[in-house]
Image: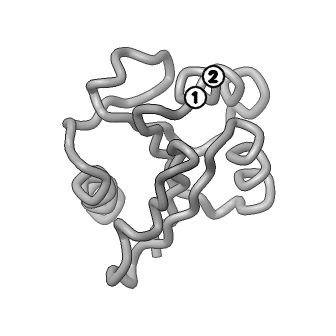
Amino acid sequence: MITILVLASSHADPALAAAGDPSVEVLGAASVEEAIEKLARNRRVDAVLLLPGSPARELAETLAEEDPSAPPLFAPGSLGEIPGVAALPDGDLAALLGGLVKRFSS
């Protein structure tokens, strides 16, 4: 089981993108505070995916300062360079999650 926390706008439901894949658990957060709370409560998160329209840069900066042992951060390349965040090829949410699953399964 791979657990991915997705920081998305409040209008997105990231769990829908992984529906039907029993090897992936997707947690969603719409704010930096919610993401930090979910990371604190759930230490089995394998990766954090930052999506356009979310406070991606703010979360990356906050985690770098407050939790250096946080799981790795990923974002589509279209977000631009964010320190401490690995770039993924651009794609829809399902493609981004699929790329992360491949990365963690190999």
Mark 1 Cα-neighbour bin, 10 Å: few <14, some 14–19, many ≥20? some
Kind of residue indicated by mark 2: Glu
The structure residue drawn at horizontal position 31% and vertical position 30%, both measured from the top left corner, is 87
Q: CA distance from mark 1 to mark 2?
A: 5 Å
Kind of residue indicated by mark 1: Pro
Residue 78 marker: none
In the depicted view, which residue is nearer to us: 103 or 56? Answer: 56
Q: Tell me if residue 65 comes above or below residue 18 in the rendering.
A: above
In the depicted view, which residue is nearer to us: 12 or 84? Answer: 12
Residue that label 1 marks = 55
Residue that label 2 marks = 58
Q: Quadrant of the C terminus?
A: bottom left
Side (left or right) of 91 relative to 62: left
Mark 2 Cα-neighbour bin, 10 Å: few <14, some 14–19, many ≥20? few
Task: Please say which color scheme the image uses.
Answer: one colour
The structure residue drawn at horizontal position 77% and vertical position 39%, both measured from the top left corner, is 33
Name which quarter of the figure residue 22 lies in: bottom left
Q: Tell me if residue 19 comes above or below residue 63 in the rendering.
A: below
Give how far across and how far down residue 20 sits, in percent: 33, 83
Name which quarter of the figure residue 32 lies in: top right
SS state under label 1: loop
Question: Contact (CB < 8 A) between labels 1 and 2?
Answer: yes
